[in-house]
Image (tube, grey):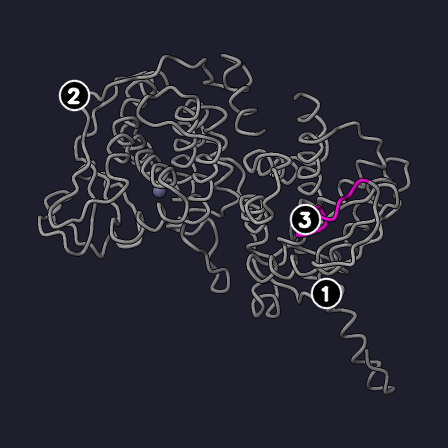
Amino acid sequence: MRNKLSIVVAAGCLVLAACSSTDPGLSISRSLSLVSRGPDASVPGTTTASAPSTQTDANDAKVDFGTNRTPKEYDSYLNNVVADIQDFWRAEYPKVYDEPYREFSGGFFAMYPSRSDDVEACGEKLPFDEIADNARYFSCGDLIAWDDDKLLPDLAAQLGTSAVATVIAHEFGHAIQQRSGVLDLQQPTVVTEQQADCFAGAWSAHAARGESSLVTFTDAEVKAGLAAMVLVRDPLDPTIGETVFEEGGHGTAFDRVGAFQHGFIGGAQACKPLIDTPLPLINLTFTSTDDIANQGNMPYSDLQASVTDDLKRFWSATFTTNQRTFEAPTVIAYNQDGPYPTCDGVTPAQWRSNVVYCPSINLIAYDNDFAINLYSSYGDFSIGYLLSNAWSDAVQTQLNSTLESENRALMNDCLTGVWTKDIVPIGSQSQPFAISPGDLDEVITTALIIDDITGRPPAASAFDRISSFRTGVLDGLGACTKRLAAD
Ligand SMILES: [Zn+2]
């Protein structure tokens, strides 16, 4: 985040100084209930769950683990994943593309430096270096190869095996694009990547619906798949002008998770049109040398005042537009071990590692130690997001919202998205406050990890919180009320 106003004020102080000595976040189950409602004209491709498949197909291409390899924990899981992904596309491809599915011919290859037998793509030996830290589909040879030395073991260790499955499902999405002719269209990489992420989401929903006896995803495993979208991507370096539209760019976590969710909710049919009509992409760039120098992170000491000033600006104006008056909450910080503020109904355990809105006294209070930890681990907008969610609760209170528990939490995420939409840089000097590259991804990451960090039961699933936040960012206030009213 950056605060243009503070830069202007600082410049003013310098002038004065010369004259005087003055110095100054749909739980998965909710998504599945959407999907399992049956075919829905507004959500193309949704179908009721079919009976689980119980056998691998004789035509299945298998995982080639090669020689000189120590077996890994995820090997049999991986065999099930590749079998199930092929089952899924055998059934889905003819429905989506209205033509027969062509069997996957080249195979799945685990790559590692000590692999002694050659893997060939198109008659050429595939060196490990070409795959290191990556997973790739090769259209010439129709094969998928991955770094089995570091990438997959690290993902499995950090996030669990479902993250591994999500990566393979994404790569298989490119094999589907080869079959549908999309790879011949020379589309920007970010467009083909978006569709591959969407396909990975469609397959993950099938696993989460329990349609396969080979692979079943729990809510936590779908969340790990989302986390894999955040971790396995090409980092962009906007300081040298790289953007999401760059060749080879996989897009931001915000965009990638959105594409995954689009497929998860709408199925493979909903992914088909993304080549001609991609989902919106938000391309944030650094606009000042100061912003580049600090990677878009404002000093922690400025954070609370800058965020709350801007929330006050935005919501006061929004209320005024609607002929209402907004009473801005007071915002204070407290130490993790107390003393804590007094608020009816908030227990000592709830103050720890939390940002709390107290409606009876219109107060937002946050654990300063917790906030510093999030700031240093995940960036400034991690705190911006949590402060805004508490602020959004004040907004709901003053609008006499009757939403409770999960729906209320999701509305807070959506309203935070609405505010965030207003601070996407528009290249105008009149915009006092703006987000920086990486800030949207900081929200995605925070939504994914926050419940694990606090240890409290989630108010809503990470999947739904992210989906709600995206709705606010992309479609604004009307979409938040419409979406939650429809639930
Ligand atoms: Zn890809």
Magenta residues, start to end: 345-353
Q: Can residue 443 be found in the magenta stretch? A: no
The residue lying toward the viewer, choosing from 13 and 305, is 305
Q: Dot 2 surroundings within 10 Å: few (below 14), some, or many (20 or more)?
A: few
Residue hosting label 1: 302
Q: Earlier in the sequence, mark 1 or mark 2?
A: 2
Gap between marks 3 and 1 measured at Cα: 16 Å
- Residue 328, label in figure: none
Residue hosting label 3: 386
| Rendered position, 144 above or below 81 | below
Q: Secondary structure at mark 1?
A: helix
Disc 2 CB within 8 Å of nearest ligand 1 atom? no
Q: Dot 3 surroundings within 10 Å: few (below 14), some, or many (20 or more)?
A: many
Residue hosting label 2: 58
- Quadrant holding ligand 1? top left
Q: Which three-letter amino acid code belongs to the residue tagged 3?
A: Leu
Residue 309 locus on image (x, y percent): 79, 56
Gap between marks 3 and 2 measured at Cα: 51 Å
Q: Dot 1 surroundings within 10 Å: few (below 14), some, or many (20 or more)?
A: few
Which residue is at 82% across, 86% downward?
Answer: 18
| Rendered position, 296 above or below 398 | below
